[in-house]
Image (spheres, rainbow, N blue to C red):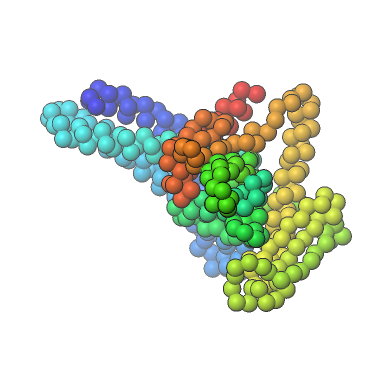
Amino acid sequence: MSVLDLRDDLKSLDSTLSSVESVVDLPKLRAELGELNAQAAAPDLWNDQERAQKVTTRLSFVKGELEQVEHLRQRLDDAKVLLELAEAELDEGTVKEVSTEVTQLRKAVQELEVRTLLSGPYDSREALITIRAEAGGADASDFSEMLMRMYLRWAERHGYSSEVYDISYAEEAGIKSATFAIKAPYAYGTLSVEHGTHRMVRISAYDNQGRRQTSFAGVEVLPVVEQDDHVDIPENDIRVDVFRSSGPGGQSVNTTDSAVRITHIPTGIVVSCQNEKSQLQNRAAAMRVLQARLLERQLQEQKAEMDALKGEQAGSWGNQMRSYVLHPYQMIKDLRTGYEVGNPDPVFDGEIDEFLEAGIRWRKQQEQSV
């Protein structure tokens, strides 16, 4: 790459990063960091563990955001100086070094730019994900478990914590359903583009004749409910059943009636949690899931009312959103964005950032075109 091309690239990156810095609002972020540091240093912080957890989580996030933006700005400025020196001294080796750095900077700045597109009212929340096996028998159950592992591996790759609330195992293979949380800021905004129906095509490992099988799994992504969401659930509106946990687990998890199933009588929504050994812990986790489902229901009702007023009849962008083809060729393709890869293995191992980025950009374009 020529010096002139590199200069143009650096100028373009500088413009993009400046836009990101404006959206992120660095002065406001630095002020918030100061306030959070003061709160974290308070001697009575851990008297309220829930509040302390929120403060420390937010502190870690804000600090990371600031360091990421400031580090990128420093790298970009250093690359400009290095290019000037290389040009003055006609140093081809340094030009190549700058070219490599520009490639890395472009990827980092684009990832940061995508974060600025997450501006919805709940985008900054943690994510609650439910995966359900749909049509396709044992293949659908196996596929559902593969998707669960994919998201948990994605979280692990990014250093995000996760918590599995409930798994219902299928008889032959895989899972009927699973509910788990990804505990990281903006996890909901990032993963919400995964909401919808996922389709798998492959030679079935569960068919005696080895025929090709198409199977489906549904992915639901909800924002984790916070205290100020005002999702009131009267005790008279729920029925709580306890039962013995099933499937793989610890020695005591399967020997006591610790699992909890909550039915919301007015809506018929049923949630369960069997991950914890304590019935009280499982009940608390199940209530969080129920609150998230009811919040989503409220949001959908509000959206339906607005769409009716606007006269919109557009279907949900989430349905039939991605195909995973393992036979007769190998390809994973997003049906909304057109983004595709030819090697499925890294994707199933959690390398889905490119799909997420494409989905977030596509959604933003859809919102702007309405």
- Residue 133 screen position, x and y as percent: 65, 50
Residue at image point 37% right, 26% down:
12
- Residue 292 screen position, x and y as percent: 70, 51
Left or right side of 316 for 353: left
The image quadrant that residue 194 belongs to is: top right
The image quadrant that residue 239 belongs to is: bottom right
Mark count: 0
Left or right side of 211 for 265: right
Is residue 248 placed above or below 350 in the rendered structure?
below
Q: Nearer the viewer, residue 183 or 42?
A: 183
Is residue 70 placed above or below 256 in the rendered structure?
above
- Image quadrant in which the N terminus is located: top left
Residue at image point 43% right, 37% down:
342
Left or right side of 191 for 87: left
Is residue 325 placed above or below 187 in the rendered structure?
above
- Residue 65 screen position, x and y as percent: 46, 46
Q: Quick one: which residue is furthest to the front in this view? A: 209
- Residue 251 screen position, x and y as percent: 60, 77
Residue 41, can we see it? yes
- Image quadrant in which the C terminus is located: top right
Q: Quick one: which residue is furthest to the right in this view? A: 236
Residue 204, can we see it? no
Residue at image point 38% right, 43% down:
70
